[in-house]
């Protein structure tokens, strides 16, 4: 393995540990996690700051490919597709928050500035395209909307309220705060039509009785 390949391997394999524990990870812990000697890390990276920057870079480099694979996998219906988008977006958001917390303010701002948000939004558009007739908004706008809702729900808590789970986010995206599930709406529509039919039948019978 070349020196560059070793650096790349360490950076990629270190991602889960840094996502879980943040900047508190020591080179000794990382070496134990990777099953290598601590000296191997020192030979690959001159200091911890350089290691962290490599881990952050590796995280964002692999995120696009993994998200695309997850979201474009065949799903059974709109609900399952949206739930997958929400779950994947939440996982990525948590990783993003953790990665940015490893950097200073200017470095984090620079990383955010160079991220291409259109990749995620285009992937969501492609995932939702088969269900475009069921949507009230253009599929190309839903990526930004879903990301906004999920990131807000995944951000560090500012209160003691319980965080929203994926199902609650899904219900909000599908039905808002005053809408009703499609099945309930169809049931109500059928009930209303049935009531109108019964009322019409009753009125006709009454008219026939008066005529008689």
Image (spheres, grey):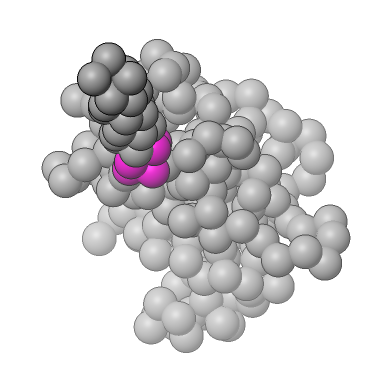
The part of the chain drawn in magenta is: 183-188
Whether residue 109 is visible here, answered yes or no, is yes
Check the image and report above or below for 205 versus 170: above
Q: Nearer the viewer, residue 33 or 1?
A: 33
Q: Nearer the viewer, residue 172 or 141?
A: 172
Please tell me in which quadrant of the rendered image residue 20 appears: bottom right
* Residue 185 part of the magenta-drawn span: yes
Q: Residue at x 38, y 43 (%)?
A: 184
Expressed as whole percent of the image width and height from the top left, the position of residue 8 reads 38, 53
Quarter holding the C terminus is: top left
Q: Is residue 201 left or right of residue 98?
A: left
Check the image and report above or below for 51 versus 73: below
* Residue 20 part of the magenta-drawn span: no
Expressed as whole percent of the image width and height from the top left, the position of residue 183 reads 32, 43
Q: Nearer the viewer, residue 59 or 93?
A: 93
Residue that lies at the very extreme toward the right in this rendered image? 159
Please tell me in which quadrant of the rendered image residue 26 appears: bottom right
Check the image and report above or below for 59 versus 42: above
Please identify the dominant SS of the magenta region.
helix
Q: Nearer the viewer, residue 62 or 50?
A: 62
Check the image and report above or below for 97 versus 212: below
Q: Is residue 147 left or right of residue 40?
A: right
Q: Residue at x 80, y 40 (%)?
A: 105
Q: Residue at x 21, y 42 (%)?
A: 77
Query: Tag count in the figure?
Result: 0
Expressed as whole percent of the image width and height from the top left, the position of residue 192 reads 38, 32
Whether residue 97 is visible here, answered yes or no, is no
Quarter holding the N terminus is: bottom left
Q: Is residue 66 left or right of residue 23?
A: left
């Amino acid at each position: 393995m070349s020196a560059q390949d070793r650096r790349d391997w360490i950076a990629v394999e270190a991602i889960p540990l840094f996502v879980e524990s943040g900047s508190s990870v020591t080179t000794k812990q990382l070496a134990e996690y990777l099953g290598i000697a601590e000296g191997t890390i020192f030979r690959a990276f001159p200091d911890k700051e350089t290691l962290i920057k490599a881990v952050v870079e590796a995280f964002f480099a692999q995120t696009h490919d993994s998200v695309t694979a997850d979201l474009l996998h065949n799903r059974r219906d709109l609900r399952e597709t949206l739930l997958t988008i929400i779950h994947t977006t939440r996982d990525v958001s948590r990783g993003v928050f953790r990665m940015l917390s490893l950097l200073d303010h200017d470095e984090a701002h620079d990383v955010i500035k160079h991220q291409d948000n259109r990749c995620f939004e285009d992937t969501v558009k492609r995932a939702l395209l088969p269900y475009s007739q069921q949507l009230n908004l253009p599929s190309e706008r839903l990526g930004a909307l879903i990301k906004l809702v999920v990131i807000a729900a995944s951000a560090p808590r500012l209160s003691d309220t319980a965080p929203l789970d994926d199902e609650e986010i899904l219900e909000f995206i599908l039905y808002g705060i005053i809408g009703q599930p499609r099945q309930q709406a169809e049931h109500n529509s059928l009930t209303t039509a049935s009531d109108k039919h019964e009322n019409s039948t009753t009125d006709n019978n009454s008219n026939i009785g008066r005529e008689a």
